[in-house]
Amino acid sequence: MPINDLPILSALRSKMQWHQERQRLLAENISNSDTPNFKPRDLVEPKFDTSGGAVGGSMGSLAMMRTSTGHLATSGGGQNFNHDGGRSGFQTRPAGNAVNLEDQMLKVSANQMDYAAATSLYSKSLGLLKTAIGRR
């Protein structure tokens, strides 16, 4: 099996390519922040198979339980949280532009950190493989 066909490496490569494309799209949003009627766009993060595949392994779900009266009770869980991932809406300027530069810059920064983590994992995985086959 070629090294390129290992599931973890192909998943990391896909993740890095997604981050590169997202960076391009976020930069496009920022560059069009003064364009009339421009709506910001973003990518949906890819989902990797975690149901017993080689990438994620098999993970069961655990229900929260109150094991002692001194512990906090579980009260529905999601009632206090905003489920739409942030602000409930965005402001559109009179020209029709809906780009919020602060939000876009936060997304760029988070994207950069996630990309750096993926590249670090990829290079460490290659280093481990090289050590395993004795090519260091």
Image (spheres, rainbow, N blue to C red):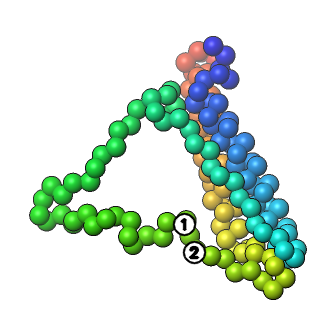
Left/right of residue 64 with respect to residue 43 in the rendered view = left
Determine the image quadrant of residue 48. top right
- Residues 68 and 88: in front is 88
Q: Which mark is residue 88?
A: 2
Q: Is residue 109 left or right of residue 88?
A: right
Going by the numbered disc 1, the residue's amino acid type is: Asp
Decide if residue 112 is in sight here.
Answer: no
Q: Secondary structure at mark 1?
A: loop
Q: Which residue is mark 1?
A: 84
- Give residue 29's position: percent from left, percent from top: 79, 65
Q: Position of residue 25 (x, y in %)?
A: 78, 57
Q: Amino acid at mark 2?
A: Ser
How far apart are labels 1 and 2 at the CA level? 7 Å
Residue 58 drawn above or below residue 84: above
Residue 99 in percent (x, y) is at 76, 73
- Taking the view exactly as shown, the residue that stands out farthest to the left is 69
**Label 2 crowd bin: few (<14), some (14–19), many (20+), radius 10 Å:** few
The residue lying furthest to the right in this view is: 35
State the image quarter where residue 8 is shown: top right
Looking at the image, residue 85 lies above or below residue 46? below
Q: Are marks 1 and 2 in contact (CB under 8 Å)?
A: yes
What residue do we see at 71% from left, 58% from top? 42
Residue 10 in the image, given as x and y percentages of width and height: 64, 30
For mark 2, give the secondary structure: loop
